[in-house]
Image (cartoon, helix red, strand yellow):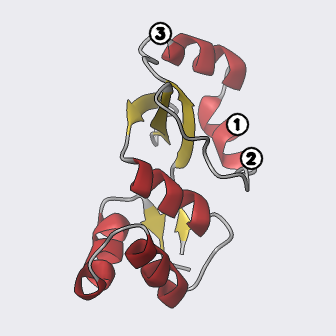
Amino acid sequence: MQPVRRAAAGPGRQLGLPERVRARLGPDPAAALAKARPTRERPPRGPDREPLLVEAGPGGEVSLGTASEPLVRLLLFAADGRLHAALAAEAVRLGAEPHEADELLTGLVADGLLVAR
């Protein structure tokens, strides 16, 4: 499975960030996101950091929102195209109940955050 959206962590209070993100992505943000290589680094932790989710819509629109840190970490872990079992184990390591891991991954696929390969 691989993430469909990009996850990141940045300084807190990012409400003014969408304009800077759009400018950095250029005239075709969806194409820029599709070509982007996900970072292999773990998001930095700290009180001034906020997990973010950047989503590219089918029409080229880009939205930026907050996400839980475990979700961002799971999506970053999935960026290498991990197997379902590895993602389930990572979800449990990040705090999911073992009996809920499969349902969680199914939900992420249904929500469009992961795509099964």
Q: Are marks 2 and 1 in contact (CB under 8 Å)?
A: yes
Percent from the top left, x then y, of residue 11? 54, 23
Residue 69 in the image, given as x and y percentages of width and height:
43, 48
Query: Which mark, residue 16?
Result: 3
Residue carrying label 2: 35
Locate the N terminus and report the quarter of the image it occupies: bottom right
Q: Secondary structure at mark 2?
A: helix
Q: Is residue 93 above or below residue 38?
A: below
Q: Residue at x 49, y 90 (%)?
A: 85
Label 3 residue SS = loop
Please rate how many residues cluster around mark 1, counting C-alpha atoms within 10 Å: few if below 14, some from 14 to 19, many from 20: some
Residue type at the position of mark 2: Lys
The earlier-in-sequence mark between 2 and 3 is 3
Q: Residues within 10 Å of mark 2 (few under 14, many from 20)?
A: few
Vertical position of residue 29 compared to residue 113: above or below: above
CA distance separating discs 2 and 1: 5 Å
Task: Locate residue 67 relative to residue 41 in the image: left or right.
Answer: left
- Mark 2 or 3, closer to the camera: 3
Label 2 to label 3: alpha-carbon separation:
24 Å
- Say whether residue 85 is left or right of residue 102: right
Between 16 and 69, which is closer to the camera in this rendering?
Answer: 69
**Above or below, comparing residue 26 to residue 31 in the picture:** above
Q: Residue under circle 1?
A: 32
Q: Is residue 27 visible?
A: yes
Q: Quadrant of the C terminus?
A: bottom right
Residue drawn at x 74%, y 47% as measured from the top left: 35
